[in-house]
Image (spheres, rainbow, N blue to C red):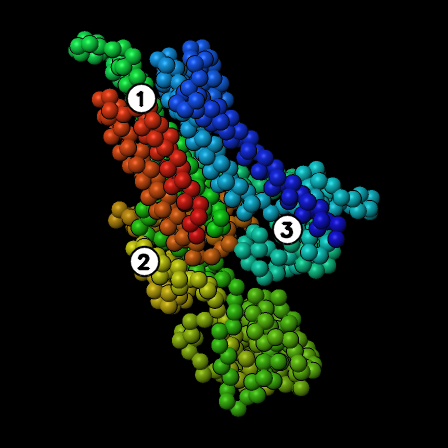
Amino acid sequence: MQPSHDTHASSHEHEHSAEGSKFQLFLPAIIAFVILILALALDHWIKPEWFTGWLRFIVYFAAFSPVGLPVIKEAIDSMKNGDIFSEFLLMSIATIGAFAIGEYPEAVAVMLFYAVGEVFQTLAVSRAKGNIKSLLDQRPDEVTILVDGQAQTIAAAEANIDDVIQLKAGEKLALDGELLSDKGSFNTAALTGESKPDTLYQGEKVLAGMINLNTVSQVRVTTAYNDSKLSKILEMVQNATAQKAPTELFIRKFAKIYTPIVVFLAIAICVCPYFFVENYQFNDWLYRALVFLVISCPCALVISIPLGYFGGIGAASQNGILFKGSNFLDILAKVQNVVMDKTGTMTEGVFKVQEVVFNDNIDQKYMLQMVSALEKLSSHPVATAIHQHIGELTLDIELKNAEEIAGHGLKATIADKTLLVGNLKLMDKFEIGYPVDPSSIIYTTIAVAYGDEFVGYITIADEIKADAQATIDQLKALHVKTTMLSGDKNNVVQFVAQKLGIDAAYGDLLPEDKVAKVKAIKANNQSVAFVGDGVNDAPVVALSDVGIAMGGLGSDATIETADVVIQDDKPSKIPLAIKIGQQTKRIVWQNITLAFAVKAIVLILGAGGMATMWEAVFADVGVALLAIMNAMRIQKLN
């Protein structure tokens, strides 16, 4: 019971730590707010005679210092790094200028609200990162390794390559490795979203995040803690915003041009009226220029737009969709044709029995028991499918002279009669006639003969995924065309496409044929997303506008090749990824429109002397906060 208690305690410690860090973020703003309220009370309600001159300045400067001095320091650091016209410089000039003309409350208020906006931005980004990390970082903190045959618990990060981990039943693996035990059953839900157990054998690769289900297993570490596939994926998504979307790149370039223009316009507002206005008052026009500076600060744009894209990446990660860059959110938002592979994308990639067709005079239960007994001798996926369908043996069946005939099937003697289970070539080999037209059956056919007589057949197929139909329906609702390209038999491909309602389907294709098909689609000026395994279809992925890999956590090559990885292997995440892309783009443009519209109105009012520093605060920080809250809505999308 002790480990559970420790985990519970560490969870509480983490919560208290998070609450403490939030309080520390808000602490400067809280101090500034309290002193500002005190100063305003002295200014407007208490009105003591001593609250004038330097004493009044000192009190307001005390309110300004916790929030203003860090911004001034950022402005100085930015200038040292060559970024002269930064938002920090605009805010610094505006507030120092306001102090210079005696507008102390406005100067403090501008910096106070700006500081609060910055805190909300920090919290929003932390929340997005936290969502991603909690989704992906499935590794336990400690591992048990064997040292000279003795079990020893150490921090997972301290485990070395070639260390042997002892993994008890129910424990989760912390590092990638190689199975040393004869075999083991693992739950791979953390990696693939599939909760069904996966049996692995000695020498096979096991990944961080897998849960050992039954007996104690031993795993040799092959990859350092920070180099596991989960670590790579986590790093990939957290750094995804390094690949900027076109909108974000435009706003950054725009801000670099816009900010210096604003500074020179503010100088012009202050100085130029001297030559044209009678009774020119320097303080009056300086105040207007400072208001103009605060209003024009591009905070709402430079904060909310990257946050919008990061929020989109975070929302996708919460749903098991991993984006390599925010630019792919934009591409998916406008994709016109989703081209997909069949096996493993729209189908399970696992064979299942579809139909059992035996002659009327046959005892079907007894015959299936005999087939199951014989198929247990084979490890072929078709044999596994048949055995799983029929289940455990309930009859005592004795097999004699059992053998596997390569490329044909299985043969054995039961009750002095020969049982044959295999393809139709097996029937031809033993000259057994069968009233079946192979071309009329779209599935893989397993023929059965007993006592030199054909008794029927079992059809096997790669089953269509449960959410495949919903995927196609949702894509149609989004007005996105669908195309299936596969190397599988054309009649099988056409059957799956027709059943799901896919717009176009092509089978019997080689990799170069798939490339030709995608080129033909792109020739019609359609943006294309290709969905496949990301490795075998690398040429098509490279040609498409965005490559999507299904269940790509098992392959380093998939992570490298694909632009988007669907972690849980569900095709229904394809339309969801498109929706997240569209929603992200919509919110980003809402923020751009909101920022420009409000700023344009208040800028005109400010230049005309009809807006004060308080309206400027709303136009800058208020709009930034609204934009941040709007951007955070993306993270709730599911």
Q: Is residue 511 above or below residue 312?
A: below
Nearest to the observer: residue 232 or residue 276 = 276
Residue at the (43%, 14%) spot, across then down: 49
Front label number (1 vs 2): 1
Amino acid type, label 1: Val
Sequence-wise, which precedes: disc 1 or disc 3? 3
- In the rendered view, tell whether residue 144 sits above or below residue 99: below
292 over 546 or under it: above or below: above
Earlier-in-chain disc, 2 versus 3 = 3
- Residue bearing the label numbered 1: 291
Judged from the image, the secondary structure of the residue bearing numbered disc 3 is strand
Q: Nearer the viewer, residue 233 or 346?
A: 233
Q: CA distance from mark 2 to mark 3?
A: 40 Å
Name the secondary structure under disc 2.
Answer: helix
Residue named by callout 3: 206
Left or right? Give the position of 498 relative to 31.
Answer: left
- Pick whichever, 284 or 367, lies toward us: 284
Q: Residue at x 58, y 44 (%)?
A: 137
Amino acid type of the residue tagged 2 in the rendering:
Ala
Residue 48 rendering spot, x and y as whole percentages: 44, 17
Residue 442, labelled with which disc? none
Work out whether residue 538 or residue 223 is closer to the camera in this orientation and state it.
223
Residue drawn at point x = 50 percent, y = 61 percent: 349
Tell me if label 2 and label 3 are in contact, CB under 8 Å.
no
Is residue 221 something that shows in the picture?
no
Q: CA distance from mark 1 to mark 3?
A: 62 Å
Q: Residues within 10 Å of mark 1 (few under 14, many from 20)?
A: many
Q: Which of pointers 1 and 2 lies earlier in the amino acid sequence?
A: 1
Q: Amino acid at mark 3?
A: Val
Report the residue marked by disc 2.
477
